[in-house]
Amino acid sequence: MGRVRRTRKDLPPRVYLKHSAYYFVYPSGKWQRLAAIGQEREMRVAWANLEQSNASHGTVASLIDDYLCNYAASSKAPRTYKDNLKEAEYLKAFFGVMRPQDIQPRHIGAYLEENRVTRSVRANREKALLSHIFTWAMRHPTWGCVIQHNPCKGVVRNKETKRIRIVDDNEYMAVYNLASPNVQRLMTLVYRTLQRPSDILKFGSNNIVNRMVDGNMVEVLSFRQGKTGALVEIILTDDLRSALYGKSIELNDLTNLNGAKSLGKVFILNRDGKPYCLSGIDSNYRRALNKYRKQKKLSTGFMPEPFGIYDLKGKGATDMYQSGIALEYIQALAGHESVTTTEIYIKSRLNKPVVSNIRKIGS
């Protein structure tokens, strides 16, 4: 039995970091270079090719790494792939030495139960990933010959309490007024477009196209959602264009986009002229949020519950619904697969008082 790793436990079996590169170490002691440091996807693909010959007799750890290399690395969004890498480590720690064909639903249940108290929600996500891995493996030319069923099917996940944060107009404006201009733009765009902040940060001049709508040529913000792949196209109004381009762009000068082009590929840039990462602009947002919460505590004596930029997506959809906008329109804007999803998404956030049943029986 080989030595237990003390560092870099995220690396596949027999892969080590040496001289700024990833190497595969054969049982004989031979070292084979896989890829340079920073080229993790290339490293995992090269490793999978070396392991492919005996993958059908491998362990769950081999199956998971094969899935990450040959499917997730090229098919999933970068953020989702990054999350999968973290989730995979917990799965490998529990199931790694087992053979895939030996795993039964009772093993999945044991995993969920072991993590029920401290990691209930995360364990559910990891179970979902493992289920997807088994579904993928059953159609894989190598793994399919030994994996005949998905042991995750039918296993009830841990109970979750969904957090729904209802943001009212006053607290939205309080945080907005304390935020930097770029954070204000992002808040406006999340609320107006109902899109994820990670997608909005990728918006650039290449996403502005012309479309014929009701016989008129109009400018449209066209993009695909990173998580769902859904195509969303939003007609540009003056205020939406202002939030995209920034106040330095003249709204009436629709033919001169030199200002937008000077911004590079994306509209919202940091002070160094580079695109924001989500964590970077979220840190700026949190500073404004925490300042508001402290001010509120000084004036009222209590600390209000925090809310994230993502919560503004739900606020925007709910406000549209309460303003009389049809669910089908909100569904198209949000990129939901069905109007039922939109209805559940909105109604879980409604906090409007309602009138009781006024009908009287027998009168």
Image (cartoon, rainbow, N blue to C red):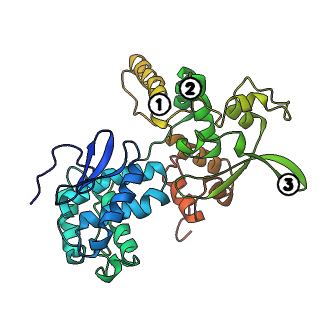
Lateral position of residue 1 relative to residue 143, left or right: left
Seen from the viewer's position, the closer of residues 174 and 12 is 12
Point out residue 254 in the picture as x, y percentages from the top left corner. Answer: 84, 35
Lateral position of residue 292 relative to residue 320, left or right: left
**Residues under labels 3 and 2: Cα distance?**
34 Å
Helix, strand or loop status at disc 2: loop
The kind of residue tagged 3 is Met
The kind of residue tagged 2 is Asn
Q: Could one spot residue 302 in this view of the protein? A: yes
CB under 8 Å between discs 1 and 2: yes
**Nearest to viewer (mark 3 / mark 2):** 2
**Residues under labels 1 and 3: Cα distance?**
37 Å
Residue 212, label in figure: 3
Sequence-earlier tag: 1 or 3: 3
For the point 54% across and 53% down, the residue is 346
Point out residue 280 in the picture as x, y percentages from the top left corner. Answer: 47, 30
Sequence-earlier tag: 1 or 2: 2
Q: Is residue 257 above or below residue 198?
A: above
Quadrant including the C terminus: bottom right
Point out residue 210 in the picture as x, y percentages from the top left corner. Answer: 81, 49
Quadrant including the N terminus: bottom left
CB under 8 Å between discs 3 and 2: no
Lateral position of residue 53 relative to residue 3, left or right: right
For the point 27% across and 44% down, the residue is 17
Lateral position of residue 310 relative to residue 290, left or right: right
Sequence-earlier tag: 3 or 2: 3
Q: Which residue is mark 1?
A: 280
Q: Is residue 286 above or below residue 221?
A: above
The kind of residue tagged 1 is Gly
Q: Which residue is mark 2?
A: 270
For the point 73% across and 23% down, the residue is 248
